[in-house]
Amino acid sequence: MLAGLHVKNMALIREAEVEFGPGLNIMTGETGAGKSIVIGAVNIALGTGNFKDYVPEDADYALVELIFTTENPRVRELMKRQDLPFEDGEIILTRKYKGGRSTSKINGETVPLSFVRELSGELIDIHGQHEHQSLLYAKNHLGILDSFARKETGPLLNTIKEQYRSYQKVKKEWEQAVSSDQERTKELDFLQYEIQEIQSAALRPGEDEELENSYRLMVNGQKIMEALSEAGNLTGVGGFGGAEDEIGRAARALSAVRGYDNSLEELGNTLEDIESLLGDFNRSLSDYMDSFVFDPQALRETEERLDLINRLKSKYGNTIEEILASLQEKEDRVELLENYESYRSELKDRLQESSQALMSTAAKLSGVRKQYAKVLSEQIRSALVDLNFLDVQFEIAFEELSEPTEEGIDAVCFRISMNPGLPLRPLGSVASGGELSRIMLAIKAVMADKDHIETLIFDEIDTGISGRTAQKVSEKMAVIAGSHQILCITHLAQIAAMADQHFIIEKKPADSKTVTHIGQLTEEESIQELARILGGAKITDAVLENAREMKELAAHIRQDI
């Protein structure tokens, strides 16, 4: 449910805050008072509109904030996927414009506009002139039917989408397989060249690391020998002075006095250990220096081998393991190409099996749709009668597609006849704008129990209607409001009288400027507003009494629903 709306610096609205309630929320006001600004602000917050032409020139920034409360599990999944905080079922959706840029936040966290649109699609559904016009396009009719039959069509649609992807994959593979023999021969020759190039290298896993270590050693051979020689001179390698001789003399000097004090015994032992360790070190150092040989030929061979491996890495993989895996793939592909007829025969069988599975599910889905189409068309026709289409006929016509899609093999079209004797024809060629708004309302009424979106906004629902038709429309909206929250902007008293919450949108002077104000009306104020709608500039006692009776009648109707 949309619990609140906060708007700042949007056209004539300097700042407005509205708290909506459950059921039917009606907004009325004079023409030009700013009702369209409210819908525009909501669209901006939801990511389907922009701030252009709304932000006043003297404003530093503009802000729209929507507060939702919801238990919709799909919303919870989306919030979790985006790792957004979601406590007590509350979502605060904020969009701010400043310095030529807009930012979107959900519960205080900045999010991309694409996610705002995705999330808002689960929270609210806006029906204005554009949405009514969507009924003109038959491609949208299938979605309405599938939503109505979701319990049975949903699993089938999931299956058919997977089968369609598999079918397309096999189909693409088949199309590539039936390419010319000349292309296959070229591919085979090229693969054999690549296989030969890799095989001739006789690569061994881990070889590159070993070679790189050897290369570093050989390249730095001179530095290593200089460092070893200096260390050997200092420690006394070869028995010519150095630290080993000095420590030996120190040990002999200390040995001469060890008998005079027991504590000198430990010092003498320590010095002897040092002399022994240094002797071992010098022998190891000498052995290393004797074994270390710099071979220019070995360096060149190592460089060439590394160059070869790196060249193969640039073509076939980042590691030797990846190169060898690429070799296996190429060998498998060669085997396939050399046995191509067998492969094509197997692929043809797979394509046929995939196509049959897809068509079987599509046929089953089509059968389910046709069963539900009969029920849905009758319910829509009945709802249209309730909306004062007295002699209406309505049907959902099917046509089989020449090729299956991920939605099956059905193309459907809503057809209607609004006058006796006239044939059923597509909505787009028959219905006017006002009629389309009522047809959309009839569909929404039928879908009310199946639609998981909690909040519906109706703008221009009263286009081209009055009198008894307006009364019928108001009653149908009250029915939908029993299971959904509805926000409706209207010019008709019959619809406004049904309000559970009634808001007035009006212009008021403030600081030498005209601003738009949004306020909630009391019961008596609502009656006054109904009288204004009914009576125009002059409100007589008779008009006021008529408004009061209309409000009381609406209350009785809501109780009976």
Image: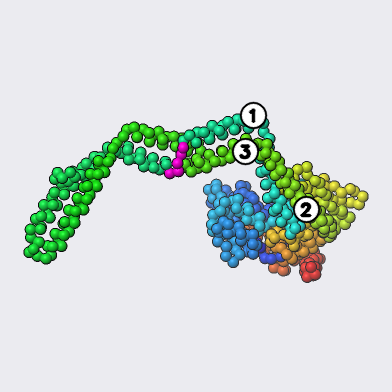
Number of residues whose C-alpha sits closer than 10 Å to that of mark 2, classed few (under 14), some (14–19) or many (20 or more): some
| Secondary element at image label 2 | helix
Q: Are marks 2 and 1 in contact (CB under 8 Å)?
A: no
Residue 333: x percent and y percent?
59, 38
Residue at the limit of the structure toward the right, as seen here: 421
Question: Mark 3 highlights which residue?
Answer: 336
Task: Tell me the kind of residue under disc 2.
Answer: Lys
Q: Quadrant of the N terminus?
A: bottom right
Q: Secondary structure at mark 3?
A: helix
Q: Decide: is 91 above or below 57.
A: below
Where disc 1 sits, the SS reads: helix
User: Mark 1–mark 3 contact, CB under 8 Å?
Assistant: no
Disc 2 designates what residue?
364
Please determine whether, in this image, residue 210 is positioned above or below residue 546. above
Q: Nearer the viewer, residue 314 or 123?
A: 314
Start-end of magenta stretch = 202-206
Q: CA distance from mark 2 to mark 3?
A: 37 Å
Q: Amino acid at mark 1?
A: Gln
Is residue 43 in the magenta section? no
Quadrant position of residue 506: bottom right
> CB atoms at circles 2 and 3 under 8 Å apart?
no
Give whichever of 307, 90 is nearer the camera.
307
Say whether residue 434 is left or right of residue 242. right
> Few, some or many C-alpha atoms within 10 Å of disc 3 (few <14, some 14-19, many ≥20)?
some
Nearest to N terminus: mark 2 or mark 3 = 3
